[in-house]
Image (cartoon, grey):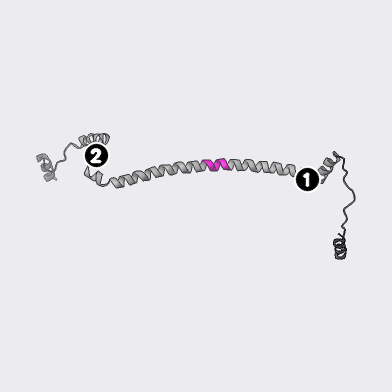
Amino acid sequence: MNRIRKQQQNGIGAVAPSGGRKLPRLLVGVLNGSFLTREKVLANMPFFLFVALMMVLYISYGYYTERTVRELHRTDGELKELRSEYITVRSHLDRTERQSQVAEDIQDIGLVESRVPPQKIEVGPEQLERRVENE
């Protein structure tokens, strides 16, 4: 332990107090762009461009998904509105198709609902053949 203190006092192995001055120099290098001309940065430029491209793609994908979610919400609202309209129209149609409603509507034009049930008329094949031959 004493040996380390002696070396530091003699200047051997001592840490230079210039660590505080290194940060402003690095900041100035970043701000004026001179760090871009260093050899290590130039050697890794394809990787940096790739990372920048990936960042742009990630941001654009975020915007795309936000737009898709907005369209889904809008379509969901339209679907709910159309479903309620369908229910309303179907209810109105069911009401107008009732026999009592139809009977009321035809009375306005002078027709009367028949109270006699319909009868089935049966025609044999011979009668059909004779009819076809007579025509």
Q: Amino acid at mark 2?
A: Phe
Q: Which mark is residue 35?
A: 2
Q: How many numbered circles does the render carry?
A: 2
- Disc 2/disc 1 C-alpha distance (Å): 83 Å
What residue is drawn where x is 23% and y is 40%?
A: 37
Q: Is residue 126 left or right of residue 97?
A: right
- Mark 2 surroundings within 10 Å by alpha-carbon count, few (fewer than 14), some (14 through 19), many (20 or more): some
Q: Is residue 36 left or right of residue 82?
A: left
Badge 1 is on which residue?
97
Q: Position of residue 89 (x, y in %)?
A: 71, 42
Q: Amino acid at mark 1?
A: Glu
Q: Quadrant of residue 72?
A: top right
Question: What is the quadrant of the N terminus in the image?
Answer: top left
What residue is drawn where x is 55% and y is 41%?
A: 73
Q: Is residue 135 above or below residue 1?
A: below
Q: Position of residue 7 (x, y in %)?
A: 11, 43
Q: Quadrant of residue 55?
A: top left
What residue is drawn where x is 9% and y is 40%?
A: 10
- Mark 1 surroundings within 10 Å by alpha-carbon count, few (fewer than 14), some (14 through 19), many (20 or more): few
